[in-house]
Amino acid sequence: MRSAQGSLQAVPNNNATFSITLDVTNNGDLLLSGATVELVISGADGVVAAELLQPLADLQPGASLQVPFSWNAAGASQWPYTVRARVLIGSQASPAESLVLLTYTKAFLPFTMK
């Protein structure tokens, strides 16, 4: 049986980009080969802002790896954004992992509050 499980994280960087990582584990008992990771980012309005695909390296049973993505949020205006990631294996897909990006805030220093 082929099966994949994932865990999704996102970290804002200081240049309007998010580093997004999906940790993938082969929790089946067969080699996971020929799979692709799909990442979809949608705004609050439901419109897809980005769809990213990345081939997944072969994974032995019980093995894990991190699949990194980068998303440039410059100009994004439909906050919050929902990130969904899943592993595509032939005509099947793993359950989607998701998280919500609430905002990307830039602060310019020094600043004065009055």
Image (cartoon, rainbow, N blue to C red):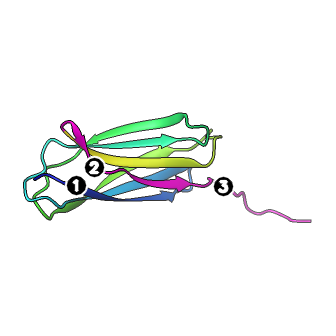
Instruction: Specify whether 26 is left or right of 97.
Output: left
**Foreground pick, 72 / 36:** 36
Horizontal side, residue 105 vs residue 42: left or right: right
Task: Report the magenta residues as a range.
Answer: 90-114
Looking at the picture, tell me which residue is in the foreground, 90 or 58. Answer: 90
Q: What is the secondary structure assignment of the residue under circle 1?
A: strand
Residue contact between numbered discs 1 and 2, judged by CB atoms under 8 Å: yes
Give how far apart the Cα atoms at labels 1 and 2 are: 6 Å
Closer to the chain start, of discs 2 and 3, is: 2
Distance of mark 2 from mark 3, alpha carbons?
A: 32 Å
- Residue that carries the numbered disc 1 in the rendered image: 4
Q: How far apart are the two marked residues, 3 and 1, measured between alpha carbons?
A: 34 Å
Numbered tag placed on residue 94 in the rendering: 2
For numbered disc 2, what is the local secondary structure? loop
Q: Amino acid at mark 1?
A: Ala
In the rendered structure, which disc, 1 or 2, sits on the residue that comes first in sequence? 1
Pointer 3 or 1: first along the chain: 1
Would you name the residue on which mark 3 appears? Answer: 105
Crowd rating for badge 3 (residues with CA inside 10 Å; few <14, some 14–19, many 20+)? few
Residue 21 rendering spot, x and y as whole percentages: 37, 56
Q: Amino acid at mark 2?
A: Ser
Q: Position of residue 98 (x, y in %)?
A: 44, 53
Residue at x-position 76% and y-position 63%: 110
Horizontal relation, residue 38 to residue 36: left or right: right
Please tell me whether the stretch drawn in magenta is mainly helix, strand or loop: loop
Query: Image height check: is 109 above or below 81?
Result: below
Please tell me whether mark 2 or mark 3 is closer to you in this view. Answer: 2
Mark 1 crowdedness (10 Å alpha carbons): few <14, some 14-19, many ≥20: many
Amino acid type, label 3: Thr
Q: Which residue is drawn at the image coordinates 73% and 61% (left, top)? A: 109
Question: Does residue 41 belong to the magenta stretch?
Answer: no
Q: Is 102 colored magenta in this rendering? A: yes
